[in-house]
């Protein structure tokens, strides 16, 4: 999947996250989280899993997490990526 424009998905509510994606020359994942110290590696794993599933290799991903669970991370990522790839 090619990322052709900026897009976002999510909210800044508790237990949710905001995902922003945009075209880039390489893969870059930036995570801001209220639980970053404890769970950054797990958040990153979920993000990377969605990127692999959708075959996205060049994108800037900015995530502002407020304690979202795995299913929310996956859903917000997929939504933002699909919006960014629409023609």
Image: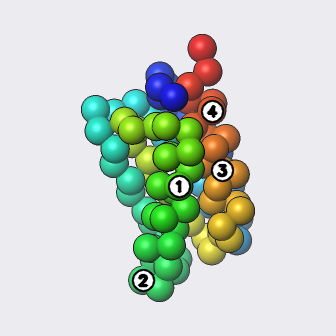
The mark that comes first in sequence, 4 or 3, is 3
The mark that comes first in sequence, 4 or 1, is 1
Q: Which mark is residue 74?
A: none
The mark that comes first in sequence, 3 or 1, is 1
The answer to whether the residue labelled 3 contacts the one labelled 2, judged by CB atoms less than 8 Å apart, is no
Q: Nearer the viewer, residue 2 or 52?
A: 52
Q: Nearer the viewer, residue 13 or 67?
A: 67
Q: Which mark is residue 82?
A: 4
Residue identifier under label 2: 37
Residue identifier under label 1: 49
Say whether residue 13 is visible: yes
Give coordinates of residue 61: x percent, y percent: 44, 47
Indicate whether 44 appears above or below 56. Answer: below
The mark that comes first in sequence, 2 or 4, is 2
Q: Tell me the mark number nearer the camera, choosing from 4 and 1.
A: 1
Q: Quadrant of the C terminus?
A: top right
Distance from Cα at disc 4 to Cα at disc 1:
15 Å
Q: Is the image coloured rainbow, by chain, by secondary structure, or in one colour?
A: rainbow
């Amino acid at each position: 999947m090619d990322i052709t424009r900026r897009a976002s998905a999510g909210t800044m509510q508790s237990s949710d996250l905001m995902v922003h994606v945009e075209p880039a020359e390489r893969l870059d994942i930036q995570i801001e989280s209220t639980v970053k110290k404890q769970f950054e590696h797990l958040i990153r794993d979920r993000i990377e899993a969605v990127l692999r599933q959708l075959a996205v290799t060049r994108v800037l991903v900015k995530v502002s997490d407020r304690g979202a669970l795995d299913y929310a991370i996956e859903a917000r990522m997929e939504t933002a990526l699909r919006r960014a790839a629409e023609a």
